[in-house]
Amino acid sequence: MSPAEIKIADLTVSHQRRPAVHHLSGRFAPGSLTAVVGPNGAGKTTLLRAIAGLHRPDGGRIEGAAGQVALLPQQSSLDRSFPLTCLDAVLLGLWGETGAFRAIPRAGRARAEAALAAIGLAGFERRPIGSLSAGQFQRVLFARLLLQDAPVILLDEPFNALDARTAAELLSLVKRWHGEGRTVIAVLHDLDLVRREFPETLLLARDCLGWGPTGEVLTAANRLRARMMAEAWAEQAEACAA
């Protein structure tokens, strides 16, 4: 399935009525590779969750994402104490196909084993996820994305706290997805990586400060505006009224 254009129209998303993404409009073209950057608290994760259908907007709309999206969340948001093996964790990528109560077919298990092998974890099928290093666990999450085989892939800080080798290998997979025509949207903090590898960038500081070709968005003036806006954010901001 080819990805559809994802259109965002006047999108506002809040936490307890406090603005996280404010009146955002724009589009992710089919097959585009876009970095989402901005200061801490800028709404980057909230935006990905809204696109994935996990955070209901307060206003505006998102078109073209329904049924197309696979999300890789931040590692810090996941509970690794739950007794899952690596194979179990990857097989969760088949949830959309099998649902909660149907048995996993033999072909599905074979696909999951192949996905683990593809990201360098052959032989890890029975290893508990709680025993893995950060890099190994991130590979498991990428294997789950391989199994989901979605046309739109959302990545929330995919290279955070990884060693250079693991980060480079997972970046190669991201570039392969882009080469296959998938739409990839990634929250990132490494601006040098963004400039080098991501042709499109969305700069968020709750409001959109730039969205387009990376060289045109990541200007010194825009980055200064983002920093100044972040420094002015109040802990108890007014509720979003519109």
Image: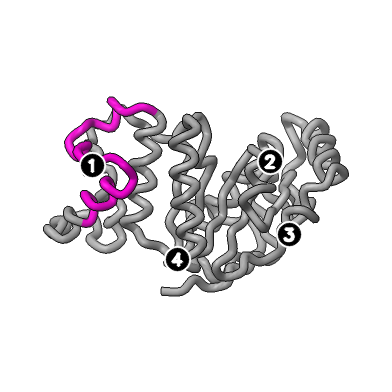
Q: Do labels 4 and 1 touch, CB within 8 Å? A: no
10 in relation to 155, above or below: below
Q: What residue did someone put label 4 on?
A: 151
Task: Please give the label number shown on residue 76.
Answer: none
Whether residue 18 is visible to the viewer of this picture, yes or no, is no
Q: CA distance from mark 3 to mark 4?
A: 22 Å
Question: What is the x, y in percent for residue 161?
Answer: 50, 29
| Horizontal side of residue 171 vs 20, given as left or right | left
Q: Name the residue tied to disc 1.
A: 122
Question: Bounds of the magenta span?
Answer: 111-133
Q: Which residue is mark 2?
A: 191
- 110 in relation to 232, above or below: below
Closer to the camera in the image, 1 or 23? 1
**How far from the left and from the top, in percent, is residue 61?**
62, 65
Residue 213 is marked as 3
Residue count near mark 2 (Cα–Cα under 10 Å), binned few <14, some 14–19, many ≥20: some
Which numbered disc flags the more N-terminal residue, 4 or 2?
4
Q: Nearer the viewer, mark 4 or mark 2?
A: 2
Against 218, is 133 above or below?
above
Query: Spatial distance from mark 2 to mark 3, Cα to Cα?
Result: 14 Å
